Image (tube, grey):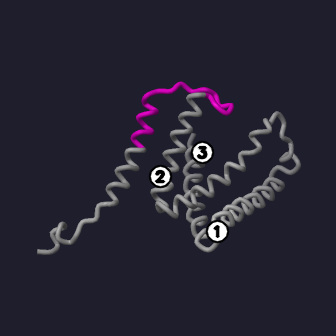
Amino acid sequence: MITGLLLALLAGSLVSLQNIFNNKVNVHVGSWTTTTLVLGLGFAASFTLGLVFEGSAMFALHHLKLWFCFSGLIGVGVVTCMVQGINRLGPTFAVSISMCAQLGFALLFDSMGWLGLEKVDFTFKQLIGVLVVVGGIIVFKVGGREKRTANEQGLVG
């Protein structure tokens, strides 16, 4: 379990780092060029590492449903939407909303047993957990918008 927690934390930090890099690339080139560079370099790196660590076993796709192979197309939407979201909302708010969406949809997919997942019983504790996270994002965003003047802070007068 500790290994899973550490890997999840590492994945979260890498996603945040990638989003920042993607946004910096997008400043200099268009959104589609950014997506092409990100996914193209990701393909080259993962293909090379796959060959190094798995060899020809990398191509053994036993019992794999064909439609799961198209998940890379979802990556196009992920990169494009995150880059545009960060441009419009800023990194912290965009990533926060993305995390809430991931959590909510993961709960939905688990509870319904969709996409080949083992169905997990839905509990209101899970719903409350998701709502607490969403509430925290709202408090974070609304709280960040308040700018007090020097007079309101008691610095002038």
Q: Nearer the viewer, mark 2 or mark 3?
A: 2
Q: Main secondary structure of the magenta part?
A: helix
Q: Which residue is mark 2?
A: 96
Query: Where residue 21 sits in the image (x, y, percent)?
Result: 59, 66
Q: Residues within 10 Å of mark 2 (few under 14, many from 20)?
A: some
Residue 28: image quadrant is bottom right
- Quarter of the figure with the N terminus: top right
Q: Residue at (62%, 28%) from the top-left corner?
A: 113
Q: CA distance from mark 2 to mark 3?
A: 24 Å
Secondary structure, mark 1, is loop
Q: Which residue is mark 1?
A: 30
Q: Residue at (83%, 40%) from the top-left corner?
A: 61
Q: Are marks 1 and 3 in contact (CB under 8 Å)?
A: no
- Amino acid tagged 1: Gly
Most distant residue in the top direction: 121
Secondary structure, mark 3, is helix
- Amino acid tagged 2: Ser
Q: Nearer the viewer, mark 1 or mark 3?
A: 1
Left or right position of 22 against 96: right
Left or right position of 85 against 117: left
Q: CA distance from mark 1 to mark 2?
A: 24 Å
Query: Where residue 33 sits in the image (x, y, percent)?
Result: 69, 66
State the extent of the magenta-drawn residues as a range: 113-133
